[in-house]
């Protein structure tokens, strides 16, 4: 893996040594999100990480900030408004940068409903259209910038806010990763706590500063990206075309991170390393239900295949299939 991607190997090894093998793909995905804002790809790659409290979500973002030059990221913290982003754009600039949102839990709990909705909508529109306009009688607001976003959130807060985040299409603009570190892995980390690993952008060879051109060479890998996107869409229960945009952007960013202007097998391998983090552990059967339905199975058959009682589980299956239908995930 990463025979043609020395930068990815260095980042992967860094996170693997410092936090363990579960965190390595997440760290590399965050690095790709940072680079994505610098590529010429129209849609940026954006990463939303969901994990229990105290499981390195913030620390990995801090590490990512340290890896890249200052003009690659905006460590925007955990308590800000859309107006703050506008002021930051005027004073320090956010264009072609990745916003590192340290703690989405604090961000959303500290806001009134109106302020929270405006912020979520504003970020979604900036990611999608590179522009956000807010019409207010006294203070109209316009923000123009190409950004990518890395955002962390606790699993508990994600479940509480999932409906609002999906309803605004905010989460549709992200690849959402879930992980839960078992107690044994957390104990293993405490043995490595004093490891002072460091990785710096200037030490990479070859330099990954090179931009990917708009006419990036995909070659035969277009088919791979399509197949991966179908798989990822079902696993995450998100719209296929939205997922495809993120899969393509992650692949382009990964190639750019390694100074390449064409895709190779390393980019596919990187995407496949993320597959295990896409299914929400609080709803582990969602993707299976959609897959069985696309195979032509009845709801009763799906209950039996999942070892569930049809009388109690069928309403849940109906709910999942309604959602899947609305997101265009059902073949029939």
Image (cartoon, grey):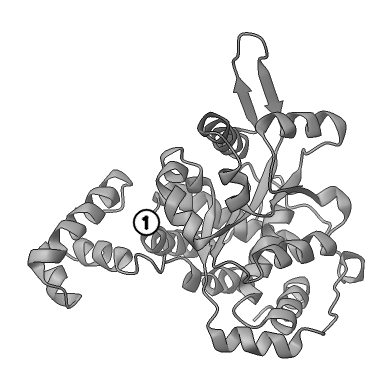
- Tell me the crowding category of disc 1: few under 14, some 14 to 19, or many 20 or more residues within 10 angstroms, Cα based: many
Reply above or below: 38 against 19.
above
Q: Residue at x 40, y 52 (%)?
A: 238
Q: Tell whether 278 sits left or right of 8.
A: left
Res 286 quadrant in image: bottom left
Query: Residue at left 82%, top 36%?
Result: 93
The N terminus lies in quadrant: bottom right
Under tag 1, what secondary structure? loop
Q: Residue at x 54, y 68 (%)?
A: 52
Question: Horizontally, is 119 left or right of 19 in the view?
Answer: left
41 or 20: which is nearer to us?
20
Q: Locate residue 81: give its quadrant.
A: top right
Which percent across, then down, holds residue 90?
Answer: 83, 28
Whole-percent x, y for residue 185 in the image:
59, 86
Which of 187 and 225 lies nearest the eye of the viewer? 187
Residue at the disc numbered 1:
237
166 shown above or below 158: above
Residue at 83% from the left image edge and 59% from the top image edge: 68
User: In the rendering, at what x and y percent does residue 66 appear?
Assistant: 84, 63
Looking at this view, name the residue that lies furthest to the top. 137
Q: Return the x and y of residue 144 as percentages of the image width and height.
A: 70, 28
């Amino acid at each position: 893996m990463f025979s043609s991607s020395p930068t990815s190997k260095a980042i992967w090894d860094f996170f693997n040594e410092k936090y363990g093998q579960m965190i390595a793909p997440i760290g590399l995905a965050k690095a790709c999100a940072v680079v994505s804002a610098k590529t010429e790809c129209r849609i940026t790659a954006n990463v939303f990480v969901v994990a229990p409290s105290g499981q390195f979500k913030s620390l990995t973002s801090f590490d990512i900030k340290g890896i890249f030059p200052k003009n690659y990221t905006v460590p925007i913290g955990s308590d800000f408004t859309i107006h703050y982003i506008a002021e930051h754009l005027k004073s320090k600039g956010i264009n072609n940068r990745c916003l590192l949102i340290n703690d989405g839990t604090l961000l959303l709990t500290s806001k009134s409903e109106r302020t929270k909705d405006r912020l979520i909508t504003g970020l979604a529109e900036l990611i999608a259209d590179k522009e956000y306009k807010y019409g207010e009688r006294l203070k109209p607001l316009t923000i123009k910038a190409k950004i990518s976003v890395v955002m962390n959130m606790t699993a508990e807060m994600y479940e509480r806010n999932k409906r609002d985040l999906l309803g605004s299409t905010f989460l549709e603009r992200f690849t959402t990763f879930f992980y839960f570190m078992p107690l044994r892995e957390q104990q293993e980390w405490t043995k490595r706590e004093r490891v002072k690993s460091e990785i710096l952008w200037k030490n990479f060879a070859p330099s990954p500063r090179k931009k990917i051109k708009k006419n990036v060479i995909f070659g035969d890998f277009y088919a791979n990206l399509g197949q991966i996107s179908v798989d990822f869409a079902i696993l995450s229960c998100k719209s296929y075309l939205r997922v495809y945009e993120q899969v393509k952007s992650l692949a382009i960013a990964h190639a750019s991170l390694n100074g390449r202007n064409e895709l190779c097998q390393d980019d596919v391998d990187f995407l496949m390393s993320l597959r295990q983090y896409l299914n929400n552990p609080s709803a582990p059967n969602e993707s299976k239900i959609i897959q069985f339905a696309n195979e032509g199975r009845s709801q009763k058959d799906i209950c039996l295949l999942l070892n569930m009682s049809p009388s109690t589980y069928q309403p849940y299956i109906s709910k999942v299939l309604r959602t899947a239908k609305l997101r265009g995930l059902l073949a029939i």
